[in-house]
Amino acid sequence: MKKRICALLAAALCPLWLAGCGRMGAKQPETASPAPEMVELVVWGAQEDQELLEQLITGFESSHQGEAVFNIRFEPQGETDCKDVLLADLENGADVFTFADDQLNALAAAGGLNPVAGPEEIRQSCLDQTVEAASVGSTLYAYPLTADNGYFLYYNKAYLKEQDIKTLDRILEVAETEGKLFAMDWSSAWYLYSFFGNTGMEVGLNQDGITNHCTWNRPDGDIRGVDVARAMVDIAGSPAFSSRTDTEFLEGVRDGSVIAGVSGVWNSVALTEAWGKNLGASRLPSYTCRNRQVQMASFSGCKLIGVNAYSSHYAWADRLARWIAGESGQKLRFELRGQGPANIRAAEDSGVDQSPAIAALLAQSEFSSLQRVGGNFWDPVTLFGENMAAGNPGNEDLQKQLDKMVEGITAR
């Protein structure tokens, strides 16, 4: 009886066992791999940085090959007005963008930037002042990119000697004698700080972080607002003076008409190509104001790179921003664009401290101030500067123009 039961069980189980053995022996269908993620990103940066950024983008794509299908494109966007363009349409703005550090507060307040994940790594790898510039309070909102957002004097040694570049009067005298030009952009409020910064008059951000205070129209004191305005009109009256944008400055250098000008490290490579061994760089000169020499001042700051909080591929955009702001990216930035690194290890590279532009920036730093002004600063100062550059053609009262400028700067 037991044998019969065992035989029946064996007969019943055998087909199942054979079927199982068959499944084990047969080739199993492969599970299809998921299609790679399609990642489209837009990067905004200065037109002059296009070659640099496209090279960094290519390197990023290669380092993440196979992880996603990338379509990353560069679009030129001026860093000085990046904030305004981005905030006009955040959801359709660039995923990654470079900008000047004075725009950080507004971008963070508007929700355009998220706090940086893993901030300690950035704080430890970057210069302290650049971390401060990339932070609101103690919260890091962007990646430090450069530590050199300032300006100084470039000059052609074939025409100007070290003793000539100490005063703007002498620079203009030499340029006039040679039939050449000195260039400075008086259509930019950023550069016009030079004339007011070391006079005892002040401009700055109020505690609300939005409005400004300003005494550039001061009617009394050791140096008054009208003294600075008159000095500017006198400078503009020289046939050797030319108010030019950065682009126009470079054009003049290349065609031989400009032998000196005020600019920053972002133009060092182009100027080296144009002037070669005759490239000179120095702190800004002094200028004559109320019968004395006043050292020209400068704004200082950093370039930062941010990630749009509304990016549809935020994680990838963040990775790309970190890549561009990383040590190797900043070394390449110095090699191609001559811009001073914010990354400590990149800044310690031996080539950085041998750059004439970086040396000039450091010399000027004694007379520079961190740029911290609200949005109402720019247009009134630009309007004033353009009229001074034209020589005050309508012979308008200088005090009234200063009062109008300050009223616009301090508007609430």
Image (cartoon, helix red, strand yellow):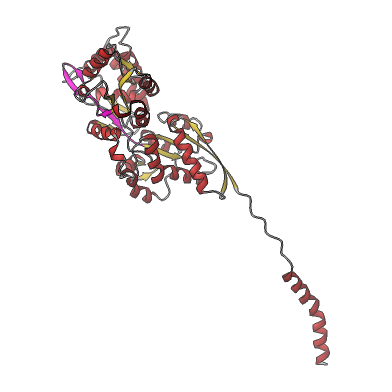
Q: Residue furthest top?
A: 394
Please check the rendered image and state whether residue 350 is part of the magenta-colored stretch, yes or no: no
Judge by depth and name the residue closer to the eye, 313 or 351.
Answer: 351
Residue 90 location (% of width, % of height): 50, 34
Residue 348 location (% of width, % of height): 30, 45
Asked whether residue 267 is in view, the answer is: yes
Magenta-highlighted stretch: main secondary structure?
strand
Quarter of the image that includes the N terminus: bottom right
Residue 256 location (% of width, % of height): 35, 19
Quarter of the image that includes the C terminus: top left
**Residue 355 found in image quarter:** top left
The residue lying at 43 percent from left, 42 percent from top is 324
Judge by depth and name the residue closer to the eye, 95 or 21.
Answer: 21
Q: With 315 as the anchor, is 329 left or right in this view?
A: left
**Residue 13 found in image quarter:** bottom right
Please check the rendered image and state whether residue 284 is part of the magenta-colored stretch, yes or no: yes
How many numbered circles are shown? 0
Q: With 1 as the anchor, is 47 left or right in this view?
A: left
Residue 269 location (% of width, % of height): 37, 31
Q: With 10 as the anchor, is 379 left or right in this view?
A: left
Rendered view: 143 above or below 75? below
Magenta span of residues: 280-302
**Residue 135 found in image quarter:** top left
Judge by depth and name the residue closer to the eye, 126 or 227.
Answer: 126
Asked whether residue 96 is in view, the answer is: no
